[in-house]
Every structure is written in C-alpha cells, then in structure tokens.
Amino acid sequence: MKVIIASDHGGVNLRREVAEVLEEAGIEYEDLGCDCESSVDYPDYALPAAERVASGEFDKGILICGTGIGMSISANKVKGIRAALVHDLFTAKVTREHNDSNVLCMGERVIGAGLAREIAKTWVHAEFEAGRHKNRINKIAEYENKL
C-alpha cells in the first residue's frame, strides 16, 4: 500500500502524527507538506494529492486542514476520488467498508492527535466490503463519467 499525505498550515501537526502512524505500520508514504504555519491555500495541496490517488500512483490519501472541510471539498472535485471527512472511529471504518473512500480528511482544530492517530490506523487497515455497496460506488462512477 502506498499513501500520500498533505496538509495546509492548519494541519501541519496532525499530518506529522499521521506520518508516524504510517511509519510504525510499515506503510510506504509520500508527504507533500506544507511545512509552515503561515497561511497557504488548501487546494494547492489537496488537488495534487487527490490527482495522484485518482491516477493510481497512490492507493490512498490522507489530507488535513483546520477543519478537514476545505480538503474534503477540494479532493472530491477530482474524478475518481471519494474523500471522507472523518472525526470518529466508526465512520473511519465504515467509510472504507461501505463507501470505498480513497481519501481520508481530518481537521486538526476539531480532533486531537490521539484520536487522529487511531482514525488513521482504522482507516488504512479497513477493507471495502463490496457486495451491495459495489453497485452504489458504480453509480457514482457512472455519474462522474457523464460529466
């Protein structure tokens, strides 16, 4: 598994926590930054990361900003991306199992480091159940292909 991670200025600290989780799990990852706390624009990080997941270069992506909302909105503009904004363990698990999310978004100003680490672990290890859920994912892909 290959994961790409990125954040804007509002998610720098949480992104570093997530990087540690990936390292501890032996998961290959690339960190796109940012490495500053001065204001930057979240689409400048979310869109390139999402594009690299959509292209198949990376299996999954994890994006972090202050709330996770900006990263989620941006990533979901990329065809083939199913980004989920997650702030608890249940939705971290279910968004992989039922929605086959390929990008996880979190907010550093919303959740603490400990919970974010557990969410990241849960999300990267959960598997898509397919079955009845596959038809729903296919409907989303069909719609995207009409655009």
Image: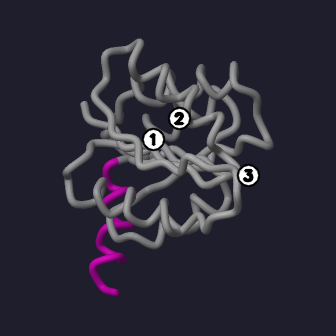
Q: Amino acid at mark 3?
A: Thr
Tell which residue pokes out farthest to the top in this image: 24
For residue 112, the mark is none
- Residue 28 found in image quarter: top left
Q: In this figure, which residue is indicated by the disc labeled 2?
A: 94
**Among the two numbered marks 3 and 2 on one chain, the one whose residue lies closer to the N terminus:** 3
Q: Residues within 10 Å of mark 1 (few under 14, many from 20)?
A: some
Q: Is there a contact, CB below 8 Å, between mark 1 and mark 2?
A: yes
Compared with residue 44, is residue 89 higher up or lower down, i.e. above or below? above
Image location of residue 114, percent across then percent down: 69, 19
- Residue 112 found in image quarter: top right
- Residue 16 found in image quarter: top right
The residue closer to the viewer here, 110 or 129, is 110
Write down the region rendered in magenta. 134-147
Q: Residues within 10 Å of mark 2 (few under 14, many from 20)?
A: some
Colouring convention used in this rendered image of the protein = one colour
Q: Amino acid at mark 2?
A: Val
Q: Amino acid at mark 1?
A: His
Mark 3 lies on a secondary structure that is loop
Q: In this figure, which residue is indicated by the disc labeled 3?
A: 67
Compared with residue 92, is residue 49 higher up or lower down, i.e. above or below? below
Q: In this figure, which residue is indicated by the disc labeled 1?
A: 98
Mark 1 lies on a secondary structure that is loop
